[in-house]
Image (cartoon, rainbow, N blue to C red):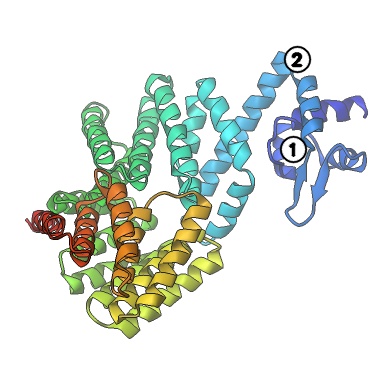
Amino acid sequence: MTDDEQAVFAKLSIFRGGFTRAAAQAVAETSLPVLSALANKSFVRFHPETARYEIHELMRQFGAEMLNESQRQADHTAHLHSAYFAEKLEQWAQARKGTRQQLSFLEMTLDGENIRSAWHWAVTHGRTELLAQAIDGPGFLYQWQGRYQEVLVMYQSAEQQLRTGTGSTQHLHEALVKARTWQGLLTHRLGQTETAIALLERTLHEDSAVNSVLGPPPSQSAAHAFLLHTLGDTLLGSARRDQAKVYLEKSLALYESLADQWGMGQVYVSLGVLMRELGDYPMAIELTEKGLAVTKAIGASSLIADCLGRLGLIAMDMGELARAETFMLEQLALYQELNFPLGVATSLDILGLLHLFRGEFNAAQNKFEERLAILHHLGVKQPIGLTYIWLGIAQFNQGLYEEAYLYATRSLSLVEGAGSLWEIGHAKMLLGYTQLARGALDEARSHITSSIALFQQLDQ
């Protein structure tokens, strides 16, 4: 290698899992001819199918040793790397809200190792301006992949730095609110609903206190709208539906004032879910269709698919099963087109419910088992408890009482203390019926009575 090639190769060792030409030019401060020379000499390998470069791990370690010979150069390169991916995370998070959604997730997935490395460097070096810039990116990516625990830890580490950081007070406060809101959302996804609610309510209290001093600028309103929506959404399925409605309506008003169609679409969906829970199907349809119209206008495919599934569930509740199936199959096709495994798992879940409604219990069981296989493959633990409930119901109706009992027991162990009252109530009801079928009358009475009490609590 020439001296220039050697210097560039050392800088390229900062990348993990490969890199694009644009990333190399920004971080290693190089050009295409130098990259081509390194590729011709087999120090890097170019993959045309992904338009990415890769360095063999042993060669990368060799380059890292060269880079670390100059601490100043190593620090400079690491800063450029972190700054580059902070900007990319900001861009990807914005792209997720429109027609470039699928491409942005593919790019983020390919750069997953670089994202984690860049984030870690910003945290350990107190670069709060980079964390604030990148704040939404990891949440969007890892929600897509179902890696809730991993990104939760990332936001927890960022919070510590954002609390003590220097710079624009309002800007850092907005990022802090978002970091804590993402923690609440992810904690809820992990099944720790009460913990999530407590965290989000503390954040709301702190945010209101700070706003009384700083005053809420438009950018901070976006963070506040996100917080209100997440808190309202987390309260769905609890006995606090009135509060959920208040938070969601406040969030919608903020998003409307910001002309944020992505945010508006999400809140319309959540309000539709609330109306469905309350049995107000006409209003549930109206709100969900508003969400669908808004998200179609911006081309946000994953949110369009969510709206279709919600409309399918409402139609199913109303007994319009053919219409429900049309919506559900449209949703499944869209998630498959997006290559979104968690979305496909969601579609399989509601199609399984449709089969239950039709009395097609074996078909329902097959759909739920397909869903479980996807969740297990992704390592997603929630909402497996709810899927166990549906599987238990399908097996109970096929006379497979012992199998149904096992699923009822598993589901209750997963949702009790973590799931919503609605989930716990269904788990206890299923366990009661399976105990009744097994002849354990006292246990059956206890579980069914407890289930009824939970559902009465929800109706209050």
Q: Nearer the viewer, residue 419 or 234?
A: 419
- Point out residue 164 in the picture as x, y percentages from the top left corner: 39, 19
Helix, strand or loop under label 1: helix
Q: CA distance from mark 2 to mark 1?
A: 20 Å
| Front-lying residue, 370 or 110 | 370
Residue drawn at (27%, 83%), measured in percent from left and top?
320
Residue 95 visible to the viewer:
no
For label 2, the SS is: loop
247 versus 265 height, above or below? above
Question: Residue at image x 46%, y 71%?
Answer: 332
**Residue 317 in the image, given as x and y percentages of width and height:** 23, 75
180 to 186, vertically: above or below: above
Can you tell which quarter of the image residue 69 is in? Answer: top right
Q: Quadrant of residue 272?
A: bottom left
Quadrant for the C terminus in the image: bottom left
Q: Which mark is drawn over residue 455? A: none
Local crowd at mark 2 within 10 Å, few (<14), some, or many (≥20)?
few
Disc nearer the start of the sequence (2/1): 1
Q: Residue furthest left?
A: 460
Direction from residue 395 to residue 75 in the image, left or right:
right
Q: Which residue is mark 1?
A: 25
Q: Which residue is mark 2?
A: 70
Q: Where is residue 284 shown, x and y percent of the image?
A: 22, 69
Is residue 352 rendered to the left or right of residue 55? left
Judge from the rendering whether residue 244 lies leftward or rightward of residue 127; answer left or right: left
Q: Which amino acid, by three-letter code, is at mark 1?
A: Gln
Q: Is residue 140 left or right of residue 383?
A: right
Which x, y percent locates residue 434?
23, 63
Q: Eyeballing the image, is 107 above or below 311?
A: above
Tag 2: residue type? Ser
- Identify the residue shown where x is 93% and y is 28%: 2
Of badges 2 and 1, nearer the viewer stands 2
